[in-house]
């Protein structure tokens, strides 16, 4: 029994000694200094990642409309002649990548910290601040980490994330799926088009429901045939089965039936706006399906819908950005009178009337002055007086008519 107790006591002493040694090792100044140096180095690297992200954003080339036309590396996977990614969406993605990369790198450094605090040996790292800093810098460049394997951010060295556009243009989860910038651009453009349509639908009562004010026939072409030699771009419609007709109407003249889906009824301005918005909303829904949803083609179609709505509702002036065609804006109630005249036309008429009235006053004053002067004479010429009075009376009568 004594022998058993002796053996157990010896084991306990050894265990206590070993455990105490581990704790003592973890509490040494060298360990604390190394851990602090690892933390400081991680913060420094995170600052470098932010700087790399800022340099990437500064290198973006932006067109006059705020869209990215060039960046570090190849961006052809998210750019076509018709579709580009906006600066705002590209920069938001860069910021997200930088944030994810900083968190991922800090997590890798914490793995090293944990091993150091447990007293575990890591190849290439000694318990000094300088070694800790060098080790973290090596990890940033693709060197081994706590597990003895290369430290990377989704198969890319952390220091190479922003040297090109490969990582930026990956899917949300950094796979080879649809680039997140395409998904976000599609959503932003679709939301913008849907919001615009909803706004006009909400304000439909602003437009006259009287066809005597203004009417829209299905056969009317809203692009003025007398202005310019180019018409609007492609107009997308819905097939009879509800699917999107991706062929569209090229060089559309904005035929009312194409805009509204109404082929027979004559519409008031209010009914035209309602039908127009309802139909364009259906076109958006037809785009938002598998095959076109969250794709470059889908972005193109959505942008086209928004452009059509803006063209028709706000009007389009010839030569705007080289687009040489004219569309008169849809007039509101306040802009419409009994004969369908818009505010601009009425304003022009009022200006002409004002000029005519001013001319009448001038002529009337001149005739009256001449008549007064003739009557002041000792022997007024009766024929002259008669002619002046007749002219004055005729002028007054004409103005009254």
Image (cartoon, helix red, strand yellow):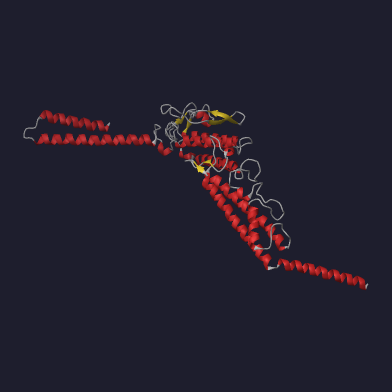
Residue 38 appears in the picture as rendered: no
Q: Residue at x 67, y 58 (%)?
A: 110
Q: Residue at x 30, y 34 (%)?
A: 352
Where residue 358 appears, as percent x and y from the top left, is 25, 37
Q: Residue at x 59, y 52 (%)?
A: 49
Picture quadrant where residue 373 is located = top left
Report the front residue among 263 and 83.
83
**What is the residue that sits farthest to the bottom in this orientation?**
2
Q: Is residue 252 left or right of residue 166?
A: left
Residue 223 appears in the picture as rendered: yes
Q: Is residue 103 left or right of residue 250?
A: right
Report the front residue among 391 and 170.
170
Quadrant assignment for the C terminus? top left
Where residue 225 appears, as percent x and y from the top left, is 43, 26
Where residue 282 appears, as percent x and y from the top left, is 57, 35
Q: Is residue 80 left or right of residue 122?
A: left
Picture quadrant where residue 391 is located = top left
Report the front residue among 373 and 327.
327
Picture quadrant where residue 385 is located = top left
Q: Is residue 329 above or below residue 225?
A: below
């Amino acid at each position: 029994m004594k022998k058993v107790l002796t053996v157990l006591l010896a084991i306990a002493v050894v265990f206590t000694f070993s455990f105490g040694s581990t704790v003592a090792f973890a509490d040494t100044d060298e360990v604390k200094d190394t851990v602090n140096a690892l933390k400081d180095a991680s913060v420094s690297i995170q600052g470098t990642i932010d700087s790399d992200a800022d340099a990437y954003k500064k290198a973006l080339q932006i067109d006059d409309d705020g869209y990215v036309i060039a960046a570090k590396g190849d961006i052809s996977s998210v750019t076509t002649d018709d579709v580009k990614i906006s600066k705002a969406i590209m920069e938001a993605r860069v910021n997200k990548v930088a944030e994810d990369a900083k968190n991922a790198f800090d997590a890798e450094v914490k793995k090293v910290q944990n091993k150091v605090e447990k007293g575990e040996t890591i190849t290439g790292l000694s318990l000094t601040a300088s070694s800790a800093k060098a080790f973290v810098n090596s990890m940033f460049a693709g060197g081994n980490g706590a597990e003895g394997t290369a430290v990377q951010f989704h198969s890319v060295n952390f220091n190479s994330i922003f040297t090109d556009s490969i990582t930026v243009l990956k899917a949300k989860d950094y796979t080879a799926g649809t680039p997140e910038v395409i998904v976000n651009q599609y959503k932003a453009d679709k939301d913008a088009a849907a919001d615009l349509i909803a706004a006009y639908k909400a304000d439909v009562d602003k437009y006259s429901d009287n066809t005597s004010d203004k009417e829209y026939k299905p056969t009317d072409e809203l692009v003025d045939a007398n202005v310019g030699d180019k018409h609007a771009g492609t107009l997308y419609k819905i097939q009879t089965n509800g699917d999107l007709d991706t062929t569209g109407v090229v060089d559309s003249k904005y035929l009312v039936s194409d805009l509204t889906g109404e082929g027979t009824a004559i519409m008031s301005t209010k009914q035209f706006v309602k039908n127009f918005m309802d139909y364009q909303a259906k076109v958006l829904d037809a785009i938002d399906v598998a095959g076109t949803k969250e794709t470059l083609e889908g972005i193109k179609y959505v942008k086209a819908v928004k452009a059509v709505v803006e063209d028709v509702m706000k009007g389009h002036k010839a030569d705007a950005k080289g687009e040489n065609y004219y569309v008169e804006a849809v007039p509101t109630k306040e802009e419409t009178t009994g004969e369908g005249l818009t505010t601009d036309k009425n304003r022009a008429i009022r200006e002409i009337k004002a000029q005519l009235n001013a001319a009448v006053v001038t002529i009337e004053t001149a005739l009256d002055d001449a008549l007064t002067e003739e009557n002041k004479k000792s022997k007024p010429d009766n024929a002259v007086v008669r002619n002046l009075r007749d002219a004055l009376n005729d002028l007054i009568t004409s103005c009254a008519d």
